[in-house]
Image (cartoon, rainbow, N blue to C red):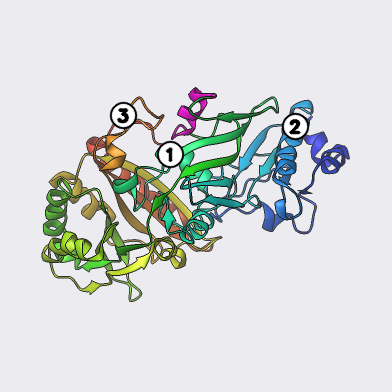
């Protein structure tokens, strides 16, 4: 049946139902629409439903989603959902099925009086923060501007504001979801509260989320940037860093890890973000400058919007990538040695090891309050391999896998969605 529908006129009926467009594999503009951020993904869905909101009211956009779900069920075709397109393993596409593409549903409405924001499901972190900053507000996001807020929220989210404001999932107040039978429901503290619990970090399998409401916080400027240290001082700097974060204030969240400079050198970095007065921030980060020889110091006051865009050059669309993550209680001698022996030097200018700092407000949320279960202070090690299409991908994939295996004995024994091949 699947093969028949791939080439039949049945999709014309679906196209007629939509305000948006329907793209089929034979269409000239199909490939650019199909492509995810990770160019490595090659899955070919039979059709992609692109809910184009540029010409319709939001209720019509939701109706596009409802029509697609009901039509797909009636034709016994598999269905997947794409947000902003950053799912690295391509699980937002489905072979010989229909993809509900929400990437054009990006409207954001901010209410400065209630300090809340309503977003459509395709809105990115950049979309939300750009709208919120006009009122001196922000909320927790990931580290990359182009990542969709819906996907990162459903997964929890690690980012620069975790210590101060918790996860994006912790700031989720309500959601509108279209269920598998095509019904639109609302999930909030009073209505379908169990669904809201699951949406806060429990993944994307509860239905098609079409809108989210977030709590916002007063924030105009942060103190952030990069401190770079030579590899010769990795052990000393990371040991002192591990001791320092045990008492770090909520306002200070520090991403650390390894990157490659433009001249090809692999260096250790600390990337603090302080939410508060610049003077207090300078005092808070001052000890970091004593951990070793700071070769580059780029700390400065910037807007949160500028901060999440500071990684844009490292994450262009179409580059091939692979990653795994491991969550550690801290950086002990054994884990530091594993990172050094298996991870250094980095295999390409685009690859990196990011160590995300989870503490403060994010750690104080009760384990049973959301579906995101790991609520104690920890470090999440993100092993990112990235390469150009012509390169040997196995070399990069094996680099990630070897580090991940070396860290496994010291990691929390929790399932991780980024550890699948």
Q: Nearer the viewer, mark 1 or mark 2?
A: 1
Q: Residues within 10 Å of mark 3 (few under 14, many from 20)?
A: few
Disc number placed over residue 366 in the picture, else none: 3
Disc number placed over residue 22 in the picture, else none: none
| Percent position of residue 37, x then y | 55, 55
Whether 126 is drawn above or below 247: the answer is below
Residue located beneath label 2 in the image? 72
Q: CA distance from mark 1 to mark 2?
A: 30 Å
| Residue 197: in magenta span | yes
Residue located beneath label 1 in the image? 169
Q: Nearer the viewer, mark 2 or mark 3?
A: 3
Pick whichever of labels 2 and 3 is earlier in the sequence.
Answer: 2
Instruction: Give, as a single range, the part of the protein colored magenta.
Output: 191-202
Q: CA distance from mark 2 to mark 3?
A: 39 Å
Q: Which of 326/150 is in front?
A: 150
* Residue 60 relative to residue 405: left or right: right
């Amino acid at each position: 049946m699947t093969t028949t529908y791939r080439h039949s006129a049945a999709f014309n009926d679906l196209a007629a139902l939509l305000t948006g467009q329907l793209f089929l594999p034979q269409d000239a503009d199909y490939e650019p629409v199909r492509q995810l951020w990770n160019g490595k993904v090659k899955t070919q869905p039979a059709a992609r439903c692109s809910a184009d909101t540029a010409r319709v009211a939001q209720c019509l956009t939701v109706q596009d989603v409802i029509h697609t779900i009901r039509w797909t069920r009636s034709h016994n075709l598999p269905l997947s959902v794409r947000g902003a397109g950053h799912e690295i393993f391509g699980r937002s596409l489905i072979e010989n099925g229909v993809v509900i593409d929400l990437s054009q549903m990006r409207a954001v409405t901010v209410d400065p009086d209630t300090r809340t924001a309503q977003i459509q499901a395709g809105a990115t972190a950049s979309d939300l923060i750009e709208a919120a900053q006009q009122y001196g507000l922000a909320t927790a996001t990931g580290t990359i501007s182009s990542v969709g807020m819906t996907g990162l929220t459903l997964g929890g989210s690690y980012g620069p504001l975790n210590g101060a404001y918790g996860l994006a999932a912790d700031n989720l107040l309500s959601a509108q979801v279209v269920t598998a039978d095509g019904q639109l429901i609302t999930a909030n503290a009073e209505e379908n509260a169990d669904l809201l619990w699951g949406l806060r970090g429990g993944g994307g399998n509860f239905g098609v989320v079409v809108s989210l409401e977030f709590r916002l916080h007063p924030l105009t400027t942060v103190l952030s940037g990069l401190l770079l240290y030579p590899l010769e001082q990795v052990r000393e700097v990371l040991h002192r860093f591990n001791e320092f974060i045990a008492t770090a204030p909520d306002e200070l969240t520090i991403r650390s890890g390894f990157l490659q400079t433009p001249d090809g050198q692999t260096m250790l970095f600390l990337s603090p973000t302080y939410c508060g007065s610049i003077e207090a921030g300078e005092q808070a980060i001052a000890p970091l400058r004593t951990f070793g020889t700071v070769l580059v110091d780029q700390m400065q006051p910037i807007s949160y919007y500028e901060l999440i865009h500071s990684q844009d050059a490292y994450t262009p669309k179409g580059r091939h990538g692979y990653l795994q993550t491991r969550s550690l209680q801290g950086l002990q001698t054994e884990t530091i040695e594993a990172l050094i022996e298996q991870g250094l030097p980095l295999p390409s200018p685009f690859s990196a090891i990011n160590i995300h700092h989870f503490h403060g407000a994010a750690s104080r949320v009760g384990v049973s309050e959301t579906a995101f279960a790991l609520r104690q202070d920890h470090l999440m090690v993100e092993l990112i391999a990235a390469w150009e299409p012509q390169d040997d991908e196995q070399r990069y994939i094996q680099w990630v896998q070897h580090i991940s295996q070396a860290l496994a004995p010291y990691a929390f024994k929790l399932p991780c969605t980024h550890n699948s091949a």
